[in-house]
Amino acid sequence: MKISLKCLVLGLILPVLPAHASVMYTLVDLMPDNTSISSGAISISDAGHVLGFTGTGDSFVYKNNSVSWLSVPRYTSVTGINSSGVVVGNSGGRGIVHSNGSTQIIGGFSGSPFSSLAYGINDAGQVVGSAWNTQGNQRATIASNGSLTDLGALNGGGWSAGNAINNSGQVTGESQTPNGGRAFITRNGQMVDLGAFAWGVSRGYAINDLGQVAGTSHVTNNEKHAFITTVDDQMIDIGLPGYTSEAFGLNNAGQAVGYFSDNFAGENKRAFVTINGVMTDLNTLIAAEIGWTLITAHDINNSGQIVGVGIAANGVVRGFLLNPVASVPLPASFWLFGSVLLGCVARRMQI
């Protein structure tokens, strides 16, 4: 590969602009006393509760350097936790809410023999998920105070699914449309179609308190890109050309987290966080000597703490917590030169 002299000169002579410091993180292994057991972290609250699971089917909450084991059925799929430490998940095909050692099952629609599922909870205790109505159609739902609300579907579609809920009760997820599954947001009790990239399919995975959504949308049949929406519902592609990516978490600062991969099957995953809207490999933001490879980031809270799954130095898949620390500024000329140089390389390599 050759880099032209023009590219090098441009990197040196373009005006120097103010630069932001690079973000760095310290990594916490959530189960340091059980390093041979595989684990993962799926959600983090604004109060710092980390919801995790093990390969042996147990679920736990990590907070203040301590692990509390949850008395939920083994192999429960835990999915979300709020700032009061209330956990939601799914067990035996049913949505559950677990609080203070007690587990309650979320019922289905009246008259329907089908159950419901739970995928997220906000600080008011509203649970987002889905349930099957009497016609057998899956519908996005909010469960609150013993009642279950059907959020409907886009354009009269048959099915929908809720994946996340913010503290205002807005929901995002996916709904059937004549053009395929589409990411949606609820506004004033109505579903709004967030659109999609070129291939027409999208899904919302996370929503912040400003009403921004993060998720994924297909740009081709075998390539999907992570996206973030603006507050006026414009979908922004934050993916990398030639790479598949999905965004699973989003905080109020607009930072998204997820993974990117060099193939559609999702192999060779690398966890990412967006910095100033740019997808950044989290593996470049932790100390290399710890020997971890971060595979997927599942969630980020409003303090910038990130949780997910990685491969520890001993080769075991483990859940992690990343805590942001004071950053070390780099000269603005470094970032500018790097971006110009990368642009030239990208044009050469067409990545």
Image: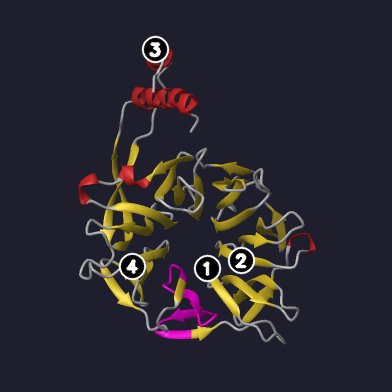
Circle 4 sits in a helix, a strand or a loop, which is it?
Answer: strand
- Residue 298, quarter of picture: bottom left
Asked if disc 1 and disc 2 are in contact, CB closer than 8 Å, the reply is: yes
What residue does disc 4 label?
A: 39
Contact between labelled residues 1 and 4, with CB atoms less than 8 Å apart: no
- The Cα atoms of the two marked residues, 4 and 3, are separated by 49 Å
Q: Please name the residue shown 38% across and 59% down the image.
A: 308
Compare marks 4 and 1 and give the one earlier in the sequence.
4
> Which residue position holds label 1?
120
Q: Nearer the viewer, mark 3 or mark 1?
A: 3
The numbered mark, 3 or 1, whose residue comes first in the sequence reads 3
Please give the range of residues in magenta.
Answer: 79-103
Q: Amino acid at mark 1?
A: Gly
Pick out the residue farthest to the right.
156
Location of residue 180 (image quadrant): bottom right
- Rendered view: 169 above or below 331: below
Dot 4, crowdedness within 10 Å: few (<14), some or many (≥20)? many
Closer to the eye: label 3 or 2: 3
In terms of sequence position, does the residue under pointer 1 or pointer 2 come before the other? 1
Q: CA distance from mark 3 to mark 2?
A: 52 Å
Answer with mark 3 or mark 2, whichever residue precedes in sequence: 3
Q: First in sequence, mark 2 or 4: give its number.
A: 4
Badge 2 crowding class, 10 Å Cα cut-off, few under 14, some 14 to 19, many 20 or more, is many
Which numbered tag is attached to residue 162? 2
Q: Amino acid at mark 3?
A: Leu
Q: CA distance from mark 2 to mark 4?
A: 26 Å
Residue 135 highlighted magenta (yes or no)? no
Q: Amino acid at mark 4?
A: Ser
Kind of residue indicated by mark 2: Gly
First reached walking from the N terminus: tag 4 or tag 3: 3
What residue appears at the point 57 percent right and 48 percent down from the top-left corner? 222
